[in-house]
Amino acid sequence: MLRHDGACWEEWKTVNELEKLAQKYPGRYQKTASGHWRCPPGEAHASQFGLKYCVRTDAELNPIFTQNLMFLSDYLGFKSNLTTDVTQSVLAYLVDGYNSSVKQKRVMVAVMSGYYHAHISKGIANQNRLQIQVNY
């Protein structure tokens, strides 16, 4: 992971997995007093190269962001076979809104007008230009 203050290797695990590994390998995985996890052997190896080694957990992930990525996973990259020109026209219509309430209304109109939600989802996933907060 490249950061402004340096670079580090990141190891991502679930909290549950780390708790089991800490019992099995107490010298390898340790929980600090502040609740963060560390891996002293990884830190020692990374320091030889002037890098840091960070153990990260699923507890650090925003659950809504994670849920959104899971929903959009079918539309990310080249998995989707949706027609690009249709997606582009839907996206152009939606992005043209002046504020989030206009965009929110346009999404509803687009869906009701026959634009498929898949094209909207693909536009969100591939273009990262349509950001709407929907209030229930």
Image (tube, rainbow, N blue to C red):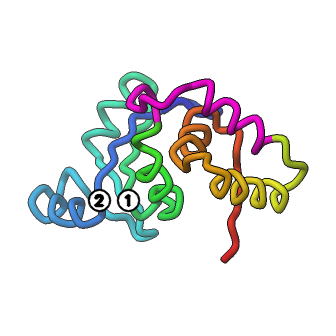
Q: Report the magenta residues as a range.
A: 76-95
**Residue for badge 1:** 58
Q: Is residue 113 above or below residue 45?
A: below
Neighbour class for label 1 at 10 Å: few (<14), some, many (≥20)?
few
Neighbour class for label 2 at 10 Å: few (<14), some, many (≥20)?
few
The residue under the point 44% across, 36% down is 52
Q: Nearer the viewer, residue 57 or 46?
A: 57
The residue under the point 61% across, 33% down is 87
Outermost bottom residue = 136
- Kindly identify the amino acid type of the residue bearing the numbered disc 2: Thr
Q: Is residue 91 above or below residue 97?
A: above
Horizontal and vertical percent for residue 119? 56, 40
Q: Secondary structure at mark 1?
A: helix
Q: How many tags in the picture?
A: 2
Predominant SS of the magenta segment: helix
Horizontal and vertical percent for residue 103? 79, 54
- Kindly identify the amino acid type of the residue bearing the numbered disc 1: Asp
Judge from the rendering whether residue 9 lies leftward or rightward of residue 134; answer left or right.
left
Horizontal and vertical percent for residue 30? 28, 59
Q: Nearer the viewer, residue 28 or 115?
A: 115
Outermost front residue = 113
**Residue for badge 2:** 14
* Mark 1 and mark 2 residues within 8 Å of each other at the beta carbon: yes
